[in-house]
Image (tube, rainbow, N blue to C red):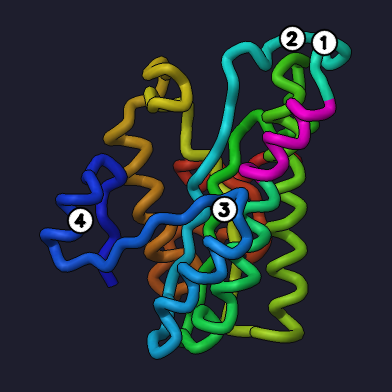
Amino acid sequence: MTLYAISLTIGQLQRRGVLTTEVDFIDEASINNASKIFDNEDVDILINSAGIYNMWDDKAFNELSADDILNHFKVNTLGPFLSSKYFLPYLSRSAQGKIINISSDFASIADNIGGNACYRISKCALNQLTKNIAMDCQKTAPNVIALAIHPGYVPTKMTNYVGEDDMDVCMSSLVNIIETFGTPEASLNLPNGGYVRWNGDIMDY
């Protein structure tokens, strides 16, 4: 199993022999079609890392519209729901299938200081989705586990390249968590359906 750094471009991944395809997280047919590429393959890990966050979202909730909320839900919650649904048959073929949902510390109700309602609510729902996936798979696909991870506040396009956490440190730890989650080699006791920080610390819902 090989995990590639997120800094690699599509072209660089392709030159390394990685199969790539474009997916529109608000288009169910696009996600379904992408999953069919793996009709004859086992999938070990599905990482739902797409996200939308608008800088203007830092307003009181009553200054936001229904469309603002719905647009965030479509990408941050519905997209991971659909990809998990359509990739589950291939994940269930793996000896240990994993669904990793990239969440946020903004998803925490306990740590909510207001603002960013669209992002907070949709990522909070993603955490609930993660727990549901874990519980349902215990009955229908017991070899598939799920985890929601806050990747750190790192400088990315989504944050306008502003962030207080070190990208290399966070991503290195994140890769280690993904690789070892659910394995005997895991140094951290990460709960199936749990919500954790990039360093493995359990987070408050």
- Amino acid type at mark 1: Glu
Residue ID for mark 1: 63
Amino acid type, label 4: Leu
Residue 20, placed above or below residue 75: below
The residue drawn where x is 60% and y is 54% is: 27
- Sequence-wise first label, 4 or 2: 4
Q: Nearer the viewer, mark 1 or mark 2?
A: 1
Label 3: which secondary element: strand
The kind of secondary structure element at disc 1 is helix
The crowding category of the residue bearing disc 1, from other C-alpha atoms within 10 Å (few below 14, some 14 to 19, many at least 20), is few
Q: Nearer the viewer, residue 32 or 60?
A: 32
Q: For residue 145, which quarter of the picture?
A: bottom right
Q: Please give the residue where the numbered disc 3 appears in the rendered image.
A: 101
Q: Which residue is mark 2?
A: 59
What's the distance in space between the residues labelled 3 and 4, CA to CA?
21 Å
Residue under numbered circle 4: 13
The mark that comes first in sequence, 3 or 2, is 2
N-terminal of the two: label 3 or label 4? 4
Instruction: Tell me residue 123's x, y (percent).
Output: 68, 39
The percent coordinates of residue 35 (x first, y second) are 49, 73
Residue 22 in the image, given as x and y percentages of width and height: 39, 55
